[in-house]
Image (cartoon, coloured by chain):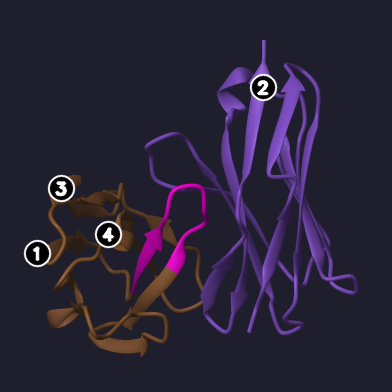
Chain colours: A brown, B purple
Amino acid sequence: EAGVAQSPRYKIIEKRQSVAFWCNPISGHATLYWYQQILGQGPKLLIQFQNNGVVDDSQLPKDRFSAERLKGVDSTLKIQPAKLEDSAVYLCASSPDRGDEQYFGPGTRLTVT
Amino acid sequence: GENVEQHPSTLSVQEGDSAVIKCTYSDSASNYFPWYKQELGKRPQLIIDIRSNVGEKKDQRIAVTLNKTAKHFSLHITETQPEDSAVYFCAANRIDKLIFGTGTRLQVFP
């Protein structure tokens, strides 16, 4: 089966610019997660969707980050405006249902200059 | 909230030796403990997981043990090979989200 797809793979922007990332989960997976992984650290959950509803966004900096999962399939994560400390790899993961094993996409490496 | 501590942060072993990575968690309600392997520049890959209704699970050269009373779980890799070199992350669930440890960089020298 096809894995989690993400694009772009790399993105370089200047601070205060905006950026968007796209994720296509494994077909049939109801739960979708966005993580931020700063170099040398473990992934940190930003937001979790169950179908097209938000389950947990407690760690999402809502003043600059937004995410949506229209139609309960693909998802986009947006940062506006970006800060230097947003430089990280943004990982998308999906699981068949809440509490099931999670499968990660290849990530988008964001560099903010 | 849930806190997951992972040790050691780096581990170097000779090919053929065993490697053990340990994690502790704080939330007694956690019942799912996966381990991920992340090679440089690649996605985290689930290599083994354990649920709280068992104490040990094995898959070829890797095994995971869980001590619910002490709230710790460990990854054991036997007969290590150079291709085992990567960063390994443990995680514990809090309700249905995962809290990750800080990672262990394993280097296997030929």
The residue wearing badge 3 is A12
The residue wearing badge 2 is B108
- Looking at numbered disc 2 in the image, what kind of residue is underneath it? Val
Q: Residues within 10 Å of mark 2 (few under 14, many from 20)?
A: many
Q: Nearer the viewer, mark 3 or mark 2?
A: 3
Q: Residues within 10 Å of mark 1 (few under 14, many from 20)?
A: few
Q: Position of residue A24 (x, y in %)?
A: 20, 61
- Give the CA distance from mark 1 to mark 2: 42 Å
The residue wearing badge 4 is A84
Counting residues from the N terminus, which is met first, the one under dot 3 or under dot 1?
3
Viewer-nearest residue: B33 or B3: B3
Counting residues from the N terminus, which is met first, the one under dot 4 or under dot 1?
1
The residue wearing badge 1 is A17
The image shows residue B61, relative to residue A103, as above or below, that is above
Tell me, yes or no, whether dots 4 and 3 are on the same chain.
yes
The image shows residue A112, relative to residue A17, as above or below, that is above
